[in-house]
Image: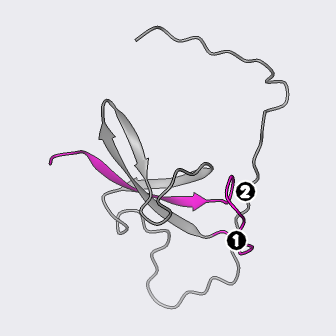
Amino acid sequence: MNIPARYATGYLGDIGVPPIHADMDFSAWFEVFLGGRWHTFDARHNRPRVGRILMAYGRDATDVALATTFGAATLSKFKVHTDEVSEAPGAEHQVRETEPA
């Protein structure tokens, strides 16, 4: 097929979907380059989502491991929280003009 693709890892909050009532966890998705731009696909959730926090791109999970340890390691606590921001303060009616394509 020869379609450029990349693995992505990061966090995916619960913005726009019913909350799970559990701590947010790492997530992974993939992107393909079609029609001159990158498109995001998520096999786990299989529907459009907002609020992705990208940490890294790579060829696979090995390329973008969240942690690589040699020997004993203990992570005692790690939490990530996301909140939806509807509009930045002072950003009312900002317009970005672009050149026609």
Residue at 72% from the left image edge and 66% from the top image edge: 19
Q: Secondary structure at mark 1?
A: loop
Report which residue position mark 1 lands on.
Answer: 20
* Residue density around tag 1, few if under 14, some if 14–19, many if 20 or more, within 10 Å: few
Residue 26 picture location, percent across and down: 56, 68
Q: 88 and 34: which one is in front?
A: 34
Residue 82 is tagged as 2
Range of residues picked out in magenta:
1-24
Q: CA distance from mark 1 to mark 2?
A: 13 Å
* Residue density around tag 2, few if under 14, some if 14–19, many if 20 or more, within 10 Å: some
- Residue 2 lies within the magenta run: yes
Q: Amino acid at mark 2?
A: Thr
Q: 17 and 51: which one is in front?
A: 17
Image quadrant in which you'd find residue 25: bottom right
Residue placed furthest toward the bottom: 72
Tell whether 90 sits left or right of 76: right
- Could you tell me what secondary structure mostly forms the magenta stretch? loop
Residue 83 picture location, percent across and down: 76, 53
Residue 39 picture location, percent across and down: 40, 42
